[in-house]
Image: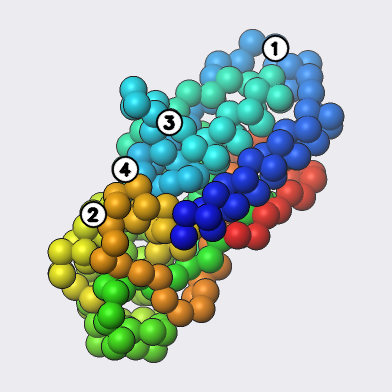
């Protein structure tokens, strides 16, 4: 698992470098020429969605997607400030316009009516996480009568409710909490973005859980913005960047 995470993280760094080179070559000085004295863009990030959104030792936003947004806006002549808060709060503040741009948001039917999205720069896949040796659970069909944990408001939550995966949905505030609950013998399984789930298992040193089955959903990850900052996201759409993990 550690080797897999290392390879994927190296791919993400390569994609980041490629995107930044292209963005700089196309958009450098465009926004500076139009609006020379702009205040920093207001953004936010989750504390524990590795490797895409994490925090530093002093509590500052970090991670692949945070760095990607920061450097992209820098190349376009803009500064950005991040606050670190739970995903549920981030969603509400973005909808109200208190947050202007987000570095990592999965596009779903439920969100298209509320937010503006860039083109996807990353496709991630979902998985089932179960306790090791629990042979009752191998596919989504096996979850029909099971207690499935998801983070409230996450893509996976929207998926299990939209597709009626189970009537026994258990909500948590973070996937860290979800993994710790399952490892302690509570509930039956978790649906989660696979790379992030494996990274959290590694970081939390949890050996009792495992990922099983084929990919079950795709997470199309994009920049996302409030209506008044749509121009910034649309400028990123003029070229297509994509990594499938």
- Work out whether residue 118 or residue 229 is closer to the camera in this orientation and state it: 118
Residue at screen point 78% across, 32% down:
21
Q: In the picture provided, is 31 more to the left or to the right than 223?
A: right
Question: Circle 1 sits on which residue?
Answer: 36
Q: Residues within 10 Å of mark 3 (few under 14, many from 20)?
A: many
Rounded to the nearest angstrom, the CA distance separating label 2 from label 1 is 44 Å
**Residue occupying image coordinates x 27% and y 82%:** 134
Q: Earlier in the sequence, mark 2 or mark 3?
A: 3
Residue that numbered label 4 is attached to: 86
Crowd around label 1: few <14 · some 14–19 · many ≥20 (10 Å): few
Residue at which label 3 appears? 61
Secondary element at tag 4: loop
- Which of the marked residues, 1 or 3, is nearer the chain's N terminus? 1
Mark 1 vs 3: CB contact within 8 A: no
Kindly report which numbered mark, 1 or 4, lies closer to the viewer in this rendering: 4
User: In the visual, does 202 lie left or right of 110?
Assistant: left
SS of the residue under disc 2: helix
Number of numbered discs overlaid on the protein picture? 4
Q: Earlier in the sequence, mark 2 or mark 4?
A: 4
Label 2: how many residues lie within 10 Å, few (<14), some (14-19) or many (20+)? some
């Amino acid at each position: 698992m550690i080797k897999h995470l290392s390879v994927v993280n190296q791919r993400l760094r390569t994609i980041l470098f490629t995107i930044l080179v292209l963005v700089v070559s196309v958009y450098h000085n465009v926004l500076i020429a139009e609006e020379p004295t702009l205040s920093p863009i207001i953004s936010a990030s989750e504390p524990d969605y590795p490797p895409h959104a994490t925090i530093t030792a002093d509590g500052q936003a970090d991670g692949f997607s945070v760095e990607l947004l920061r450097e992209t806006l820098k190349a376009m002549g803009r500064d950005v400030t991040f606050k670190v808060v739970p995903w549920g709060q981030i969603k509400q503040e973005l909808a109200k316009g208190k947050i202007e741009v987000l570095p990592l948001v999965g596009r779903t039917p439920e969100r298209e009516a509320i937010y503006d999205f860039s083109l996807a720069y990353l496709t991630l896949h979902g998985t089932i996480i179960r306790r090791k040796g629990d042979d009752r659970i191998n596919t989504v069909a096996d979850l029909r009568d099971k207690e499935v944990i998801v983070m409230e408001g996450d893509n996976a939550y929207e998926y299990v409710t939209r597709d009626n995966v189970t009537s026994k949905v258990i909500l948590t505030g973070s996937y860290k909490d979800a993994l710790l609950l399952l490892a302690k013998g509570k509930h039956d399984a978790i649906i989660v973005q696979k790379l992030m789930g494996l990274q959290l298992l590694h970081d939390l040193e949890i050996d009792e859980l495992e990922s099983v089955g084929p990919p079950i959903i795709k997470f199309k990850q994009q920049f996302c913005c409030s209506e008044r900052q749509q121009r910034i996201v649309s400028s990123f759409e003029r070229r297509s960047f994509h990594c499938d993990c």
